[in-house]
Image (cartoon, grey):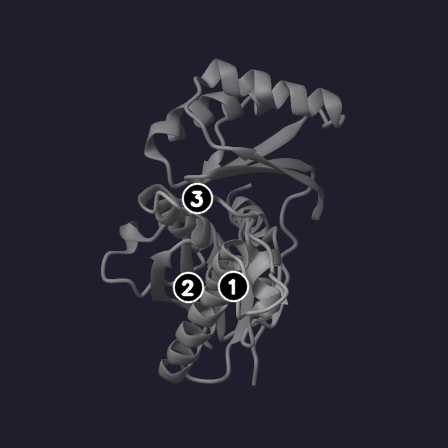
Amino acid sequence: MRKRSPRRRGAKGALVAVDIGNSDTVIGLFRERDLAGFWRVTTRTETGDELRLRLDGLARAHRWPRDLGAVMCSVVPALTLPWLSALTALSGRAPIEVNATTATTLPIRYHDRTAVGADRIANAIAARALYGTPAIVVDLGTATTFDCISAQGAYLGGVIAPGVASSADELFRRAARLARVELRRPARVLGRTTEESLQAGLIWGAAGQVDALVRRLALEMKGTPTVIATGGLATVIAPECETINRVDEALTLKGMRLIWEEHA
């Protein structure tokens, strides 16, 4: 039987959640339990003061509440402290930082639990709470990661593969005669132009990779896992996959909120 974690009462109020990735940073605003909106920006090196100005601009433009909690998830060590500083200035208190220590309700079966990326932890917690277990989360970002959650709700580990856009960038860098193309579904798999051929290889090649790895992972897991896609390219790749059950672009942010509730 598919299990779902009990719904937590949690803390009330507004919360800003910042997911700092290698390519994109996603900033989300929760009002109570509802995700009021999220904004995706290019990750770049900035000081705490510069990030505070960015947050202040978003807060004014979208009328954020004055009293805010804060939670952050970073896989970019050089930006962790600047974001901690900016969020502390914004909310008046230090944010909760997602890691293997603060995710107190998630059993982690990795050999080195501290090596699990913060975004992977948040994804596992959100998948478990929102979609039940067992589950596999496919996060289509700078890397394509596959994270497995057992029927009992433990994080088992998974797969890390090159990301779709990262692979494309390297291909275009190395092949002088191949021009960049838009990452979108071509009309046919048998390309009759270089653009069509590249798009078919990138889009359906990625979809085939997802399906093959999900099927192999599912064979090693007990039960039939629900497969949830998230990340910046989820809406592009997931529709071409046979194994994806749900798409949730904000899955990481939702997991971050659940971790924040554990400490609020």
Between the C-alphas of marks 3 and 2, the distance is: 19 Å
Foreground: disc 3 or disc 2: 2
**Type of the residue with mark 2:** Phe
Whether residue 157 is situated above or below residue 178 in the rendered picture = below
Q: Along the line of sight, which residue is nearer the eye, 95 or 250? A: 250
Tag 3: Cα neighbours inside 10 Å, few (<14), some, or many (≥20)? many
Q: Amino acid at mark 3?
A: Val
Distance from disc 1 to disc 3, alpha carbons, whole Å, reads 37 Å
Which residue is tagged 3? 98
Tag 3 or tag 1, which sits nearer the N-term? 3
CB atoms at circles 3 and 2 under 8 Å apart? no
Label 1 residue SS: helix
Q: Residue at the right extreme?
A: 63
User: Horizontal and vertical percent for residue 22?
Assistant: 41, 39
Q: Residue at x 58, y 24 (%)?
A: 91
86, above or below 204, in the image? above
The kind of residue tagged 1 is Ala
Mark 1 crowdedness (10 Å alpha carbons): few <14, some 14-19, many ≥20: many
**Residue 184, horizontal then vertical, whole percent:** 59, 55
Pick whichever of labels 1 and 2 is earlier in the sequence.
2
Q: In the rendered image, which residue does mark 2 sit on?
A: 146
Quarter of the figure with residue 29: top right
Toward the viewer: 40 or 86? Answer: 40
* Residue picked out by circle 1: 200
x, y percent for residue 177: 39, 45
Q: Position of residue 242 (x, y in %)?
A: 56, 76
Give the Cα distance between marks 1 and 2: 22 Å
**Quarter of the picture holding the C terminus:** top right
> Which-is-in-front pick, marks 1 and 3?
1
- On the rendered structure, is 34 left or right of 264? right
Quadrant of the image occupied by residue 76: top left
